[in-house]
Amino acid sequence: MSTYGSFPAARPRRLRTTAAMRRLVAEHRTQPADLILPAFVREGISEPVPVGTMPGVVQHTRDTLRKAAVEAVEAGVGGLMLFGVPDEAKKDARGSAGTDPDGILQVALRDVRAEVGDELVLMSDLCLDEYTDHGHCGVLTGDGRVDNDATLERYAEMARVQADAGAHVLGPSGMMDGQIAYVRAALEEAGHTDVAMFAYTAKYSSAFYGPFREAVGSSLQGDRKTYQQDPANAREALRELSLDLAEGADMVMVKPGLPYLDILRDFAERAEVPVGVYQISGEYAMVEAAAEKGWVDREAAILETLTSFTRAGANMILTYWATEAAGLLRARR
Ligand code: PBG
C-alpha cells in the first residue's frame, strides 16, 4: 500500500495495454463500404492529367476512369462520385455541356455503369460550376448575381440527363434554395422514381476548396458567399437540414469535413436519413503536403481523419483516398 491509499481508483490504461485489447474495445471502425471515391473525368484527353495541387489525384480519361471504378469495386469501396471536366471551348454562361446527353459527365456515367453495373453506388455531381464560363454554380442575372430560380430549371434538366445516363444517386451541390424539391419533382415526372438524392445540405463557403478548382479547371471569379454557408454559422445548418429533409433528401451531407465535425455530429443526432461527410480537396492537400515534407505519418494521418468522421457519426465518407484507404483499413483490421 502506498501512502496514497488505493489511488488511482480507476486505470483506463488497462484497456490500452496491447494492440489486440485496443482492437477489441474500439468503439468505432470505418468500413471500406462507407467510403465514396470522388473522381474527375476530362473530355478530349488521351492520357490522365495529374492535378498539381492534389498529388496522387488525376483528371481521368474515359478509359482510366473505368479502370479506377473497377479498382474501387475490388477494394470494397461503397460508391463513386463523378465530376465532369468539359472542353474549355464548351463552357458558356448557362453551362450547356452539363445538360447535353453527350456531355462528358453523361458519357462517363454510361461507361462506368456498363463497366461495374450495380457493384458500387454511382453518384454524379449536380452543379453547373464545372460547365459555366463564369465558374458560378448557377446562371446569372443581368447584373451578375446568381439567379436562384432560373438555376433550379437548369438543375432539373441536368438531373434528367444524369439519371438517364445511369446515375443511382444525384448530388446537388449548388446550394440553391429549393433545389432538392425541384429536382425531386423533375425526377418523379421523368419516371426516375428510384434515383436517390444525396443533398449537400450544409455546404460551407470554404478556403479548402482551392485545389478542387484546379482539378475541374474552374474559371471562377469572385466567391460563392451569396449561396454557400458562412463558416460562423451552426444553427443555419440545422435550418438547411430541416428544409432538405422536408424537400425529400434521401441522404444528407456536411462539407468540408474536419473543420465542421460539430455540424456532422449535429446532423448525426437529428437526421432520420443516412449522413455523409465530404473530406474535400484542401483537406487532402494538407495531409499530402505535410507528409511529403516528412512532418506527419501519411497513412496514420489518413486513417485518423477517417476515424474522426465515423466517430462524429458519419455513415458515408467522400474521400480522395477511398481506394487506398479501403486497402489500409482491411490490412489493419
Ligand atoms: C461544386 C463542388 C465543389 C466541390 C464539390 N462540388 C466546389 C465548390 O463548391 O467550389 C469541392 C470538392 C473539393 O474541394 O474536394 N460543383
Image: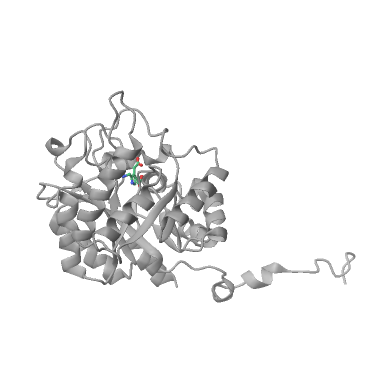
Q: Is residue 145 above or below residue 198?
A: above
Relative placement, left or right, of 66 versus 308 is left
Which image quarter holds the C terminus?
A: bottom left
Q: Tell me residue 248's x, y (percent).
A: 41, 58
Q: Total label count?
A: 0
Colour scheme of the rendered structure: one colour
Q: Quadrant of the N terminus?
A: bottom right
Is 330 located above or below residue 207 in the figure? below
The residue furthest front is 189
> In the displayed structure, would residue 167 be above or below residue 280?
below
Residue at point 45%, 63% (across, down): 274
- Identify the residue at the far top of this view: 143
Residue occupying image coordinates x 28% and y 65% = 72
* Residue 87 screen position, x and y as percent: 14, 41
How far across and how far down the image is residue 13, in percent? 68, 68
Residue sitting nearer the eye, 170 or 205: 170
Is 299 or 217 nearer to us in this picture? 217
- Ligand 1 shown in quarter: top left
Left or right: residue 56 compared with residue 245 = left
Residue 56 visible to an observer of this rendering: no
Q: Point out residue 103 in the picture as x, y percentages from the top left corner.
A: 14, 49
- The answer to which image quadrant residue 216 occupies is top left
Residue at 33% of width from left, 70% of height from top? 76
